[in-house]
Image (cartoon, helix red, strand yellow):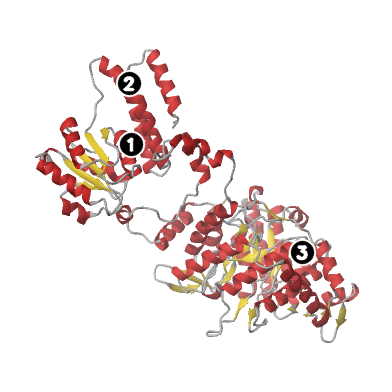
Amino acid sequence: MIESPKIGIFEYFTKEEIDKIHNATLEVLEKVGVKIEEENALKLLDSVGADVDFTKKIAKIPPHIVKEAIKNSPNSILFAGRDSKFDLKLEGKRVHFGLGEGAIEYLDSENNSIRPSTMSDAENASKLADALPNIDFVMPLFTAQDVPKQVMPLYDLYASLTNTEKPVMVVDFGLDANYLIKLASIIVGGEQELKKKPLLGVYSEPVSPLTHGKEHTRNLMTFANAELPVVYIPSPASCSTAPATMAGAIVQSNAETLSGNVIAQFTKKGARFIYGADTSLMDQRTGVFSYGAPEWMIVNLAMAQLGRYYDLPIWSTGGCSDSKILDGQATLEAALSLFIAASSGANLIHDVGSYLNFGLTGSLELVTICDEIASMITYLLKGIEVNDETLALDVISKVGPGGHFLTQKHTIDHLRKEHWMPSLLDRQMRESWVKNGSKSLLERAREKTKEILSNHNPNPLSKDIEKELQNNLKDIEKEILK
Amino acid sequence: MTFDKERLIEETKKGLNEGLSPDELLDAITDSLREVGDKFESGEFFLAELINAGEAAKIVISEYLEPSIKESGSERESIGRIVLGTVAGDIHDIGKSIVSSMLFTAGFDVVDLGVDVAPDKFVNAIREYNPEILGMSALLTTTLPMQKETIEALKKSKLRDKVKVIVGGSPVNDDWVNEIGADGYSEDAIGAVKVVKKILKISD
């Protein structure tokens, strides 16, 4: 968590460029419009003055409607923890880190093999995230591939709700979001209470280019009505589902998420909408959607800058890699993308440590490594103080040329609060390092991960609530699978 | 636990005035230093804190306790004497000073000759102080050969057999130690105490 970053804001585009992107976006929404598969949303937009073609399901949205929706959006959103000490305030420059959800494979880092991920993996990921100090919100990382597919999102959610007290975000995967709300509300004692203590957020997506799918639109509206945090952002790939030029891909992404906000705000004024895009490219040699490309990082910078322009809470992505295993590429792409996302000033950065292999593979060790990266970035962006005491003129003159500072009171007074201490990165001299087993970063991350999973016990739900959660999960499962 | 030199001095004076024996105070300080050392090993305390504790103790012991102890006719028990210095042509002080402080904290009697110490100055110091160990620091690859020259000077003065020689500095490695015929080295200041204890067969 970076509460008041000193630099914190990497303004990649000029004001004129942002204006151009904004104006182009308004033009796309007004002249091209968006396709909306959900009849109720089309009717809603028709009623507020959009130009709707019900046969083609296209809504052309004039600028004043887009602007009104932005005006009605909250610029500060509470994302609550089960324990209020983990509450997050999504506003201004406050930066928070969290996992992702969607990996279908678990990486066994001992032999670099993969296997289908399970509910138990999602539980372990949530438990690990609960313990790691630089992870602020939790997503289950893995999808439970060992339960019936239609109800998988419920098991993923259950895994997180029962293993962390931090705020929980889940992907809807097209499942009726009412079920997700139902489960989370059990923890706080009802849906009204959940509004006051919104410990569940949902992540849903439009389908690029410029299409709002039926289930996703419904879930957007459901979460708007439930007054819960809703992330509704596109993931287009430049060259395939968005233009080849990054500026064009940004315009389209902006049109997609802003039209989502129009649906949300006219469904329920003040809907807790979180803005952003996870836009990357289709690699022209392999066809993949890259989670490590610099183009993807540039879009993260653009969306954060646009989000601030609209004064909306911002979602971002970082700490991922296209590598298949936990190697140099993985840590390099994870570190760089995480730094870019954090320095953009985005409020929620997801997929931290969660995605290898284009989002297919998850690695718990990468989460542990990214916790260290996030710690370092937090220190970097928090910045250092410059005042009479820190300028240290007194002690510089006291020590004078040729002396040293080790034995100065000023040194003792400041070193602990001034300096960052690694918990995973190695700074031993070679001989000590050899004596301690010559361990690589990966080996140390593996040890730390194992240690946390065997010793950390997340504060459990009460037996009654857990039982009720299980019963409801079973009931919903029966209803869906019948 | 305090790293505050002034406070330690105050407390020591107070203790002496109240009639505590200097030996008792010395034991208490020595115990605290051991605790600081253990906490440094476990990662709880940082380097500057370790050095500070050592320096504070050093001042209190040499300026307040040792004079009283000498008056009573006894001496501070030392587990060994070490002469230290940075070699001729090299004015890098800090690594050698940390080693000095660490050895003192560990209970050694340390004679620090400072920086830019010529071979004959080392030779004279060995005659004068008769230490078990001579430690030479050199940060630069270009000043490293002075460690060898100093050892040669010891041989010429027929002192090489009387003293064990340890060397340190970032370019030092096993090959260099063998080449110049030194008795040991540590790759960092923190390891120096262990090397010295090993050479002198002192258990931890």
Pointer 2 residue? B65
Per the model, the C-alpha gap separating discs 2 and 1 is: 18 Å
**Vertical order, B71 against A254 (above or below):** above
Counting labels gives: 3
**Residue B175 image offset from top left, x and y in percent:** 20, 56
Q: Is residue A246 left or right of residue A374?
A: right
Q: Tell me which residue sits at (64%, 65%) in the image.
A: A316
Q: Tell me which residue sits at (82%, 86%) in the image.
A: A56
Q: Tell me which residue sits at (68%, 55%) in the image.
A: A187
Secondary structure category for the residue under label 2: helix
Instruction: Work out whether disc 2 and disc 1 sit on a shared chain.
Output: yes
Disc number placed over residue A310 in the picture, else none? 3
Secondary structure category for the residue under label 1: helix
Q: Quadrant of the C terminus of chain A?
A: bottom right
Residue A63 visible within the image: yes
What is the three-letter code of the residue carrying label 2?
Leu
Q: Residues within 10 Å of mark 3 (few under 14, many from 20)?
A: some
Disc number placed over residue A445 in the picture, else none? none
> Which one is nearer the viewer's eye here, B158 or A367?
B158
